[in-house]
Image (spheres, rainbow, N blue to C red):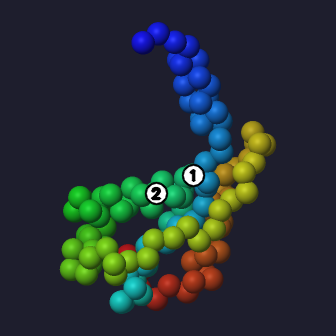
Amino acid sequence: MAGGGGADRREMVRKYKETPRPAGVYRVQHTPSGRTLLGAGPDAPAMLNRIRAELRMRGHRNHALQADWNAYGADAFLFEVVDLLPPSNDPGNDAEGELETLLALWREKLEVDGKY
């Protein structure tokens, strides 16, 4: 099958790579105990997917979180993006510093009792 589909695919890949990732703060909460893992990353939804996958594969590096997952199952957990940074086209933008600040604000705001 011949065709010019390669150019379309390259264009789609280029557009995907140029799309800003949703940087922000995410939370994984064990709802029965309230224990919470709060984190930030350059692609918050992808981080939540990674954490879910690691827990399903029984390979998450946080042993307490993994133990609760093993004991209570997926239904006992809340996975959510709690805040996103607005996309910036400024090359001098300190996204990492902004993420750290945003994470600190959410740690204060949520007043997490139990932490992973």
Q: Residue at x 57, y 77 (%)?
A: 107
Depth check: 116 or 56 in front?
56
Residue 50 vs residue 100: left or right?
left
Give the residue at the far front of this rendering.
Answer: 1
Q: Residue at x 47, y 10 (%)?
A: 2
Question: What's the CA distance linking mark 2 and mark 1?
Answer: 9 Å
Depth check: 55 or 104 in front?
55
Where does label 2 land, which residue? Answer: 47
**Position of 53 relative to 1 (above/below):** below
Is residue 81 in view?
Answer: yes
**Secondary structure beneath label 2:** helix
Residue 63 vs residue 107: left or right?
left
Image quarter where the N terminus lies is top left
**Position of 2 relative to 99 (above/below):** above
Q: Position of residue 111 (x, y in %)?
A: 55, 86
Depth check: 40 or 50 in front?
50
Label 2 or label 1, whichever comes before in sequence order: 1
Q: Amino acid at mark 2?
A: Met
Task: Bin the neighbour count of mark 2 within 10 Å (Cα to Cα): few under 14, some 14-19, many 20 and up.
Answer: many
Where does label 1 land, which residue? Answer: 42
Q: Position of residue 5 (x, y in %)?
A: 53, 19
**Secondary structure beneath label 1:** loop
Residue 73, by quadrant, is: bottom left
Residue 58 vs residue 81: left or right?
left
Is residue 10 in view?
Answer: no
Q: Amino acid at mark 1?
A: Pro
| Res. 3 mark | none
**Position of 93 relative to 50 (above/below):** above
Q: Position of residue 113 (x, y in %)?
A: 46, 89
